[in-house]
Amino acid sequence: MEAPRAAEPAAGKADDLQAIVTRNIRVAMALRGVNQKDLAKVLGIATSSMSQKFTGKTLWNLVDIEKASGFFHVKPEALVAGHGFEPWTSGL
């Protein structure tokens, strides 16, 4: 008898989540008047690496999301919410 295998994530789900995080971080940046260079400094990465996150060449990870949420004074869930970033309920 073969051991059950973990379910594979549905195709496109990770890409969808990355796009949601990117969109929500862009909104948070616009609301706070923050540029990519400022956010890169907070995340402890090079500006070029920050640019790659926004173009999808490099993925957002949990540490990025946690640092960004602290910087924007929102819960991490606000940056990964699939329904859209809502600054009026997230503290921005």
Image: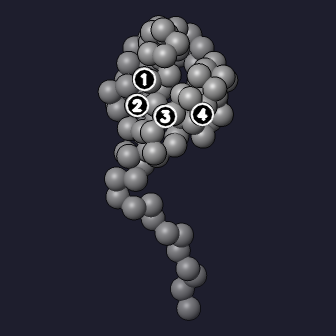
Provide the secondary structure element on which disc 4 rests: helix
Q: Horizontally, is 81 left or right of 42 in the view?
A: left
Q: Quadrant of residue 90?
A: top right
Is residue 70 or residue 27 the one in the foreground?
Answer: 27
Q: Residue at x 46, y 46 (%)?
A: 82
Q: Badges 1 and 4: C-beta atoms under 8 Å apart?
A: no
- What amino acid type should be assigned to the residue bearing mark 1? Arg
Who comes first in sequence, dot 3 or dot 2? 2
Q: Residues within 10 Å of mark 1 (few under 14, many from 20)?
A: some
Residue 61, above or below 5: above
The percent coordinates of residue 75 (x first, y second) are 65, 34
- What amino acid type should be assigned to the residue bearing mark 4? Thr
Q: Badges 1 and 2: C-beta atoms under 8 Å apart?
A: yes
Provide the secondary structure element on which disc 2 rests: helix
Q: Badges 3 and 2: C-beta atoms under 8 Å apart?
A: yes
Q: Horizontally, is 91 left or right of 82 in the view?
A: right
Q: Which residue is mark 1?
A: 26
Provide the secondary structure element on which disc 3 rests: loop
Q: Which residue is mark 2?
A: 23
Which quadrant would the N terminus be assigned to in this image? bottom right
